Image: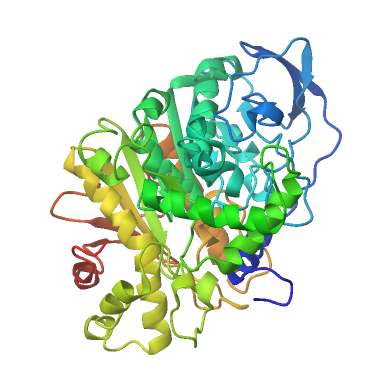
Amino acid sequence: MLASGWTRREFLLQASLAVLATGFARGSEPAASLATPSGRLRGELAEGVRVFRGIPFAHPPIGSLRFRPPEKFVWSGERDATRFAPAAMQSSRGMAMSEDCLALNVWTPQGRGPFPVFVWIHGGGFLGGRSSEPVLDGAEMARAGVVCITVAYRLGVFGFLDMEPLLGPSYAGSANLALHDLIAALRWVHENVEAFGGDPERVTVGGESAGAKLTGILMSIAEARPYFHQMISQSGGAERVGTREHSQRVSEGFAEELKNAGVKNVREAPAEELIALQHKFLTRWPEHFPLRAEIDGHLIPRLPTESIAAGSARGKRLLLGTMRDESALFIGAHPKHEVVAGDLGNLALPRFTDVAKRYHDVYPQMGAEELRIRALTAEEYWIPSMRMAAAHLQDGGACWLYRVDFSESSGAYAGRAEHGLDVRLVWNRPSAIAANAVEEAALARQMNQAWIRYIRGEAPAAQGLPEWPRMERTVRYTMLLDHASRVEKNPQEAELRLWNGVL
């Protein structure tokens, strides 16, 4: 336990979110009014971009709607859309939070369109994050001809805890409330985006970290299928779902926290109290990441990769990749401690150890620190991503792979391409103070341009990047994004074989 009272994961989550919180100036701007099928909005117009913030896509999930699936919301009169909605309830500090959080933000070009649409799902370990992070300002994408949308969803016990053991059968499947939120947001986009100049038949859904994992799960859900035609997964995969038995054990564990705190009615307890109890629960639970989506037999009938391989995302395109040193963010750039269960994303510790001890045979030139980062990165991010790509290809889907090798030049993660660095690159918000700021700015422009071309329906490409071939069943063509990017066939092939049959 850290001195702050946060768990190590919670503390590092805040550190990673702080990296994204680079502010941007916004002066006085004229109003922009727009009529949508859900109601009229008053937003702002700035530098050729119309911005609408805090648009509700569902009724506030409060009162009798707490722990319930989202319900459609239509308003009367003109709604102020000039301010972001509060973030979902979480342990983070220094931000406005509320259960009334189911809102999205839209940046759209002026003109009639139709423009391609990009819907971004924020990361944060299913426990934190917000759709209004300054790094996620969509104005630049809008100026490039993309309707850019960032969406919120319920977090922690409000979005990923199965309440059936606590509240009865009518709450079955509530560990998937966050996914219901995202489907509701995508449905809202499908029904309303034409009013913003967007094309409802050209919607790309994507995200990073938890947002990428949720994107992978959405690929497997039949109910979500009509609302997007292609996907972007940055540091994701679709492995992190639990069984009904796992969800029930977690619910019973949280029920003990409620009992110890004297909370008799979880439906009426203050949201802040539930978040405080969530924190206590997370510090005591023996497994890694207990709060997660579940195979409920309805929304998620089986492992997402199994559904994807069977054709749940048939005909859709996928852009997918990871950072070379993802796990350095969580265990440090020079980790000294042995791997513990809390470092893992998917496996129990003994099974991971069986694989990790063979890493030295594959990379005999690497030291213990490097091997630890490499194995943990594979366990949580790289292997699940490769499994998802392979499943998508199994049904004939189109897939482009990448790995970001560009590393920090200074600071705590010097020499590492750590988890989250890609967000500021893709959104073209490079560091202005790094020793290699010029190189970072160049790569950020390239990645931003490649992502925008992909969102438009083209192959990812940018000036200065080599031609980016699609992945094939027998060849994993992978774009290695760095100072001098290059394409490699089947990178890390020997490492990949270590994981055969493990996840």
Q: Is residue 111 above or below residue 303?
A: above
Identified at 67% across, 37% down, the residue is: 267
Between 459 and 373, the one nearer to me in the picture: 373
In the image, taking residue 412 as reference, residue 100 lies left or right, namely right
From this view, report whether residue 442 is shown above or below residue 353: above
> Would residue 48 be visible to someone looking at this image?
no
Q: Position of residue 358 (x, y in %)?
A: 24, 82
Residue at horizontal 60 percent and vertical 61 percent from the top = 281
Residue 377 x/y as whole percent: 40, 68
Q: In which quarter of the image is residue 4?
A: bottom right
Q: Residue at x 26, y 88 (%)?
A: 364
Residue 150 drawn above or below residue 355: above
Residue 416 in the image, given as x and y percentages of width and height: 49, 74
360 or 280, which is in the foreground? 280
Count the marks. 0
Nearest the viewer among 406 and 399 is 399
| Quarter of the image that includes the N terminus | bottom right
Where does the C terminus fall, quadrant-wise? Answer: bottom left
Q: Quadrant of residue 144?
A: top right
Nearest to the observer: residue 233 or residue 14:
14
> Which image quadrant for residue 367?
bottom left
In this rendering, would 477 be left or right of 332?
left
